[in-house]
Amino acid sequence: MKCNEIQELMPDLAAGLTAATPELEKHIQACGDCATKLKEFRQTMALLDEWKAPEPSPYFDTRLQARLREEAAKQPVGWLAWIRRPAMAGALALVVVVGITIFQRDTVGPNSNGDRIVAVPGTAVGDLQALDKNDDLYANFDELDDLQVQQDVTANP
């Protein structure tokens, strides 16, 4: 085993949560750094076992409840505080609806009349629309080339 693997297991070994395997014990006996760190971990765990948490004051709960009541009394209670949350929710809903409307208007596709929106010629979308519109014309270019070759052959025997 490598020292990095051993060091990851050391907190559990020192706390007694994991039992040491023979391979692990062999490495700890051979490696002085790992043995020292394990000893330090065990000392730290022993100190933590001795430590006692301080008891809270017997009046802690009473004072906490009083403080919570004071803070609740400070918050404004009125029609403005009552309507604030629904007004914020309505404003958020309005922002979402406006955003969706703007997004849908900017998309390319059929407009309200059912016509396609024509893109600017020279752009990628405009060129694709022109190719789609003139598909039949471009498909016949090969026939025109063949006709020109036949004319050249008959003119120059």
Image (cartoon, grey):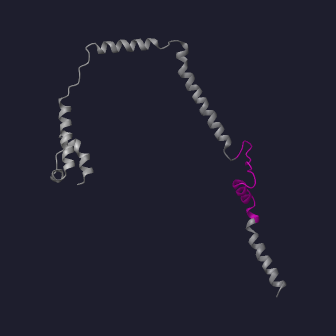
Residue 137 rendering spot, x and y as whole percentages: 77, 65
Foreground residue among 65 and 101: 65
Residue 102 vertical placement versus 60 (above, below): below
Q: Position of residue 62 (x, y in %)?
A: 31, 12
Q: Is residue 17 visible?
A: no
Tell me the magenta residue range.
110-137
Q: Is residue 103 above or below residue 69?
A: below
Residue at the farthest bottom position: 157
Q: Nearer the viewer, residue 155 or 35?
A: 35
- The reply, left or right, for residue 7 in relation to residue 70 is left
Dividing the image into 4 quarters, which one contains the N terminus?
bottom left
The number of discs equals 0
Q: Nearer the viewer, residue 110 or 67?
A: 67
Q: Does residue 114 appear left or right of residue 27 in this picture?
A: right
The verdict on residue 114 being magenta is yes
Residue at 38 percent of width and 15 percent of height: 68
